[in-house]
Amino acid sequence: MKNLLTTLLLGIGLSTNALTIEQVWAEINYCELKHPEIVLAQSIKEAGWEYNSHNAIKRNNLFGLKGGQKSESNKYGYRVFEHWSESIDTYKNKIQNRYIEGEDYFQFLIRIKYFQADSDIYISDLKWIIKRLKQKGIIC
């Protein structure tokens, strides 16, 4: 029965190996990203608390990173990764490489125009996610 369920889920584009916040947190720390709690919050904001956004599931893209091939099914040019951990590595190399040591990270995200939404709302959402992650004991 499990093989049939797995086949059905994969056939409609769903993974049976659900990605967890704890796995993403561990990878962010393993890759030594700066301000890991904010980066984790960004991944949740972009991909959902269960990492079930279209970009996360179909493209292994946890941050909505662009720079990929535009097509009918990818009209905004989101990057496609073989494995979700590659999106964390790309975030480090393409986003954090512009960070100035000591800069307020929220101000950094505004400076580089990381998001298209209203900056106050986006930053407020990230802070709320960080607060919830602390309440759940996922981060300190």
Image (tube, grey):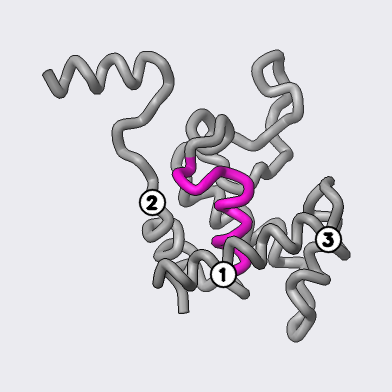
On the picture, is 109 further left or further right than 89?
right
- The residue that appears at 29% across and 15% down in the rendered structure is 8
**Spot occupied by residue 19 in the image (x, y as percentages of width and height):** 38, 46
Residue 34, horizontal then vertical, whole percent? 61, 74
Part of the protein shown in magenta: 36-51
Q: Secondary structure at mark 3?
A: helix
Q: Which of the 4 quarters of the picture holds residue 16?
A: top left
User: What residue lies at 71% left-to-right and 18% top-to-bottom?
Assistant: 71
Question: Observer-nearest residue: 56 or 93?
Answer: 56
Magenta-drawn stretch contains 56 = no
Seen at 86% across and 52% down, the residue is 118
Nearest to the observer: residue 96 or residue 11: 11
Mark 1 sits on what residue?
131
Residue 40 position within the rendered picture, expressed as x and y whole percent measured from the top left: 55, 61
Name which residue type carries label 1.
Answer: Lys
SS state under label 2: loop
The quarter of the rendered structure image containing the N terminus is top left
**Residue 50: numbered disc:** none
The secondary structure type at the circle numbered 1 is helix
Structural distance between the alpha carbons of marks 1 and 2? 18 Å
- Residue holding disc 2: 20
Residue with the mark numbered 3: 120
Question: Number of numbered discs present?
Answer: 3
Mark 3 residue type:
Asp
Query: Residue at position x 24%, y 22% from top?
Result: 6
Local crowd size for mark 3, using a 10 Å CA cut-off: few (<14), some (14–19), many (≥20): few
Q: Position of residue 82 (x, y in %)?
A: 47, 37
